[in-house]
Amino acid sequence: SQSKCSTRKQLTIAGVDYPTDSWTNVPRAILSNYGRKLHISQHHPLAITRQLIESRFVGFKNHNNLPGVVTVDQNFDSLGFAPDHPGRSKTDTYYVNESTLLRTHTTAHERDIFRDNQSDGWTLAADVYRRDAVDRSHYPIFHQMEGALTWHRPNFSSRDACLDAIKDSLRKLPKHDLAVEDPNPPFHPDHNPLQEKYHSPEEAEAVGAHLKRSLEDVVVTIFTEADKALASAGQASSTEQEPLKVRWVEAFFPHTSPSWELEVWWRGDWLEVLGCGVIDQPLLIRANQPDRIGWAFGIGLERIAMLLFGIPDIRLFWSKDERFLRQFRAADPYKRFQPFSKHPAAPRDVAFWLPASAQGPVVADTPASNSSAPSPAGGQRTETVKAGVEPVFHENDLMEVVRMIAGDAVEDVKLIDDFTHPKNQRRSLCYRVEYRSLERTLTAEEVNAMHEQVCSELVGRFNVEIR
Ligand code: FA5
Ligand code: MG
């Protein structure tokens, strides 16, 4: 592997030793942040956000302390991910070893929690880990909250009784008067089908309606409450003077069907805040709950918190700076973040020729890597790597080199030029790395030293030729 970690014989995570193998690719920088548990740190904005969401699910059991090392079975197999699903790739996922990884989503615990069956409704917040791009909204560790609600439906003959129960709980949900855009046809027979083998169309529609209304309630309530509190304190609103705009779009997950994502209008664009759907019945069957039917969702806590508090950069959540931390109080949750400083950015470019063996397309950001779509809109992988062949250069590997060297002193990395020489067909890439610390001004010497190290690591690891 390209990772230096693979030379270690074992990896110790939270006091537990794991054998390493050719799959091991967890860098030390990740382990140093493992176990910070920001989502249960009192007064941390992620913990406040978690509590605000939990408060909308009355009677649900909250699981908030599950360790992040899980098995490949929990993270992928138990959820019906295909053996060749791109989310399983080493370029997207941090592997401890071949059978063990850092969970890429909180869904990794669904089967086990359904199997325990301690409550009809539950939520679970946790840190999740993904190899990904470097910019102000992506960090290799972020937090999700999973939630699910199931109804007991003892056998097929009692479908109608269960349907009545679902419709009854739908009637009892709080109402809101926001017009939510829902442009998609509710169900797509070809790639997002109703599970007609298990559910009647009426049941699926009722579960879907209950799911959507429950999640609309979360978003509408939190942002409306925030705006009320901010207005009375004379502060800018969380939607930044624009009225709250929310819409449903179709989505794809191996563990739900049909599936949707909820998007919120923010700073001139739609921001995806959660994925959800009607739980795949085979998953409930694997969890030994064939007599239950229901919905599940996974929401990004950073995404909600960035909107709610106006936090401009995802790295701030990891700050230990009191000027950040003291701004948030659980008892008085609705506050706008006041930037305490803006230090200058220091851009540096790195241009290089790829080795002759790596001339195929470079893999770009894969935001939809946990979805099951053959070609999800907006999140296609541009990779053309043949099955079983490891890509020689993957953009996420470059991202990781930059993070390893610059840590939180890097704000953004983007491809600014991609050029193939007309005569010899060699391919050259140029990336712009924006160095900027949130806490202090970096000196030119420091930035140059980091950048030189980035360049030499790229040469050493990927055999590129710096231009
Ligand atoms: C999932 O992870 C699904 N497991 C969610 C799910 C659960 C669907 C249960 C159905 C039922 P996705 O990869 O889209 O889906 O991530 C879910 C949410 O996590 C996103 O909507 C977003 O809010 C947040 N998220 C995803 N990637 C990042 C990232 N790199 N940084 C910050 N937040 C992210
Ligand atoms: Mg998504």
Image: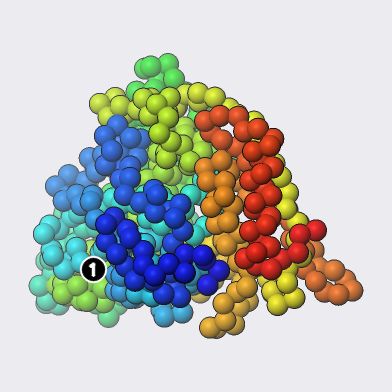
Q: Which corner quadrant holds the C terminus?
A: bottom right
Look at the image and tell me whether residue 55 can be seen. Answer: yes
Pick out the residue farthest to the bottom: 387
Q: Amino acid at mark 1?
A: Arg
Taking 451 as reference, is 441 above or below it?
Answer: above
Q: Nearer the viewer, residue 110 or 55?
A: 110
Taking 107 as reference, is 283 above or below it?
Answer: below
Question: Which quadrant holds residue 419?
Answer: bottom right
Residue 160 at x, y = what percent? Answer: 15, 69
Which residue is at a point 40% across and 20% down the rendered structure image? Answer: 231
Q: How is the image coloured?
A: rainbow
Left or right, 414 with reference to 438: right
Q: How many marks?
A: 1
Which residue is at a point 89% across and 74% down the rendered structure image? Answer: 423
Taking 127 as reference, is 326 above or below it?
Answer: above
Look at the image and tell me whether residue 209 can be seen. Answer: no
**Residue carrying label 1:** 111
Q: Considering the numbered disc 1 on the image, is that residue within a helix, a strand or a loop?
A: helix
- Mark 1 residue CB less than 8 A from any atom of ligand 1: no
Residue 215 at x, y = what percent? Answer: 32, 49
Residue 87 at x, y = what percent? Answer: 46, 69
Pick out the residue farthest to the right: 423
Residue 193 at x, y = what percent? Answer: 38, 73
